[in-house]
Image (cartoon, grey):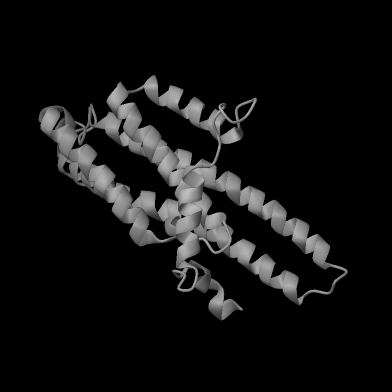
Amino acid sequence: MMTSLLSIFDPGSNVVLSNWVILFSLVFFPVSKLFWKTFSLIQSMYTMFVKLIQSMFDSKESLVYSSLFMFLFLINLMGLIPYGFSLSSHFSFNFCMGFFLWISTMIWGFSKNLNANISHLTPMGCPLILVPFMVLVETISMIIRPVTLSLRLMSNMMAGHMIISLISGAVFSMLWLVKPMFLFLNIFFFMFELGVAMIQTYVFTMLMMLYWKDTE
């Protein structure tokens, strides 16, 4: 089982249709108050996040990051569904998304205010002899931002999926007397992974928002 543990992150070949069905069914999932008497958890979380974004950005910018939040949350949620392909567990997907979002903020920020963004590379009160070293350090830390974003999201999502896969595989090899215990344990880790998916979506979006604010 250990040799095939990472196979859970491979693209599905015989369930490709189900992946698309899952993706589009999530879009039409009733989370609005139009369908329910009270707000659902997803609707409440999304409303709270949108209010936070609107207090920090203009209407156009808040629309971008609220859309990013829902898109990434649906991607993370799709990875928890059986036979769903976990896109956020792959570095290539996370890096492509993070890199293009980061480079767009850099281009916009430097084109809007070049002098202010260059001055951020040197902290105030820094000795003159340390200026070249500080510029190098700040430049490297700025360049590796999409890499750290991608690795953080990938590692957190992969860890949860691998734990769930290990417990699920152990359930089938256990005696009937102890299977219910491992089944409830698997349900607990699934709910925990759902919380991790929400938190990682929030962290990823908030960091992109902070990177945007740094360039202003």
Q: Is residue 135 left or right of residue 201?
A: left
Q: Is residue 80 left or right of residue 215?
A: right
Image quadrant where residue 185 sits: bottom right
Task: Provide residue 151's location: percent of width, then percent of height.
Answer: 40, 55
Q: Number of numbered discs present?
A: 0
Name the outermost residue toward the right: 177
Task: Provide residue 21's location: percent of width, then percent of height.
Answer: 48, 56
| Residue found at x 38% / y 60% | 91
> Observer-nearest residue: 37 or 192?
37
Q: Is residue 53 left or right of residue 38?
A: left
| Residue found at x 34% / y 27% | 62
> Observer-nearest residue: 151 or 26?
26
> Observer-nearest residue: 112 or 46?
46
Quadrant assignment for the C terminus: top left
Task: Provide residue 176's location: percent of width, then percent of height.
Answer: 85, 71
Task: Provide residue 95's location: percent of width, then percent of height.
Answer: 32, 55
Quadrant assignment for the N terminus: bottom right
Figure check: 119 above or below 71: above
- The answer to whether residue 144 of the structure is visible from this angle is no
Figure check: 85 above or below 193: below
Figure check: 79 above or below 37: below
| Residue found at x 34% / y 61% | 92
